[in-house]
Image (tube, rainbow, N blue to C red):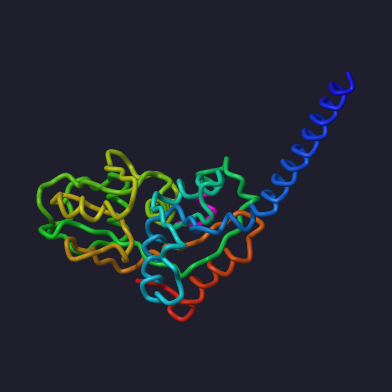
Amino acid sequence: MLYSILAIMFKRQKSFYRMKFIKYIVFIAILCVPFLSHAGQYRLSGSTSVGLYVSQLMERRPEQFDKDEISINSVGSGKGLTDLAHGNADIAMVSTPVDVMKARLPHLPWHDFKVFALAPTYLAFIVHKDNPVTSLTQTQITQILNKEITNWAELGGKDQRIYIITEFRTGGVRSTAEEALLQGQTIKEPILKLTAAPQIVPYTARFENAFGIVTKMMVDESVVEIKTAAEIVQPLYFITKKPVSTELLTLIKSFQSIDTQQGIID
């Protein structure tokens, strides 16, 4: 009988200390979470324009940035903001006015976000290398996007239907174009919608009747950039959740500091 009582007491005591040990481990883990969250990569998700810009800055200052610590997921401004809201990114990369994104994605927790401005860039309108149309007015571009002009022959080109190539509506490049030229209204269908702006360049190079909307950073020798009298500025942003950690703030300021003299990137 005495042996049974002692055995029960021993088991209870052992269970008590085991529970204390588990609580101690959980407590230590909670304390370590802020440090572990940035022990690996900083996760940047969103605008292809900003992703390209970030990559260029990192190449320009390799001594300042560790590529192994920064992952860039170029999936479009809207998807980047969604990733940030769901905890799947540390920084959302956005390439359109913030007020425009707020209007298009009102369900996101904007009160929890903090915005950091980067050096802006310009929009670019591109065509196939064999297209004889190489310059347009902003009015003509607006008419193309509104489907008031639908054939290149109306602009002095070949008798071909104009094939607009752009992003999905939450993409930063498309959002900026629609805000600047269509007062926020959507580009008229039919259009080819791609998930990432850099895809627009090879598609435009492929189709002779294409009219692509990208940024100047993306234009290469495979296409021709349309000349226009007035250029459209495209803002670039980093957006994070509040509060911003010291480590993340240091990283953001490092990118901001490189282009303080240049102002606008080409």
135 or 68, which is in the foreground?
68
Reply yes or no: does residue 118 show up in magenta.
Answer: no
Residue drawn at x 78%, y 35% is 14
The magenta stretch spans which residues? Answer: 96-101
User: Is 176 positioned to the left or the right of 192 in the image?
Assistant: right
Q: Is residue 81 left or right of residue 31?
A: left
Q: Quadrant of the C terminus?
A: bottom left
As rendered, which of 33 and 104 lies closer to the eye?
33
Please determine whether, in this image, residue 121 is positioned above or below residue 161.
Answer: below
Please, which residue is most extreme toward the right here? 2
Q: Name the spot of residue 125 as percent of width and height, x first.
A: 27, 59
- The image shows residue 229 at horizontal and vertical percentages of 30, 69
Residue 16 placement, left or right of 187: right
Q: Residue at x 16, y 60 (%)?
A: 133
Q: In this view, which residue lies farthest toward the bottom?
A: 261
Q: Main secondary structure of the magenta part?
A: helix
Q: Name the one closer to the observer, 46 or 17.
A: 17
Relative image position of residue 203 (x, y in whole percent): 21, 50
Residue 32 relative to residue 257: left or right = right
Residue extending farthest to the top is: 1
Looking at the rendered structure, the number of numbered marks drawn on it comes to 0
Is-magenta flag for residue 98? yes
Q: Nearer the viewer, residue 89 or 179?
A: 89
Using the image, determine if residue 139 lies above or below residue 3.
Answer: below
- Residue 165 image position (x, y, % from top left): 26, 48
Which quadrant is the N terminus positioned in? top right
Residue visible at 27% across and 46% down?
A: 148
Residue 72: quadrant of the picture: bottom left
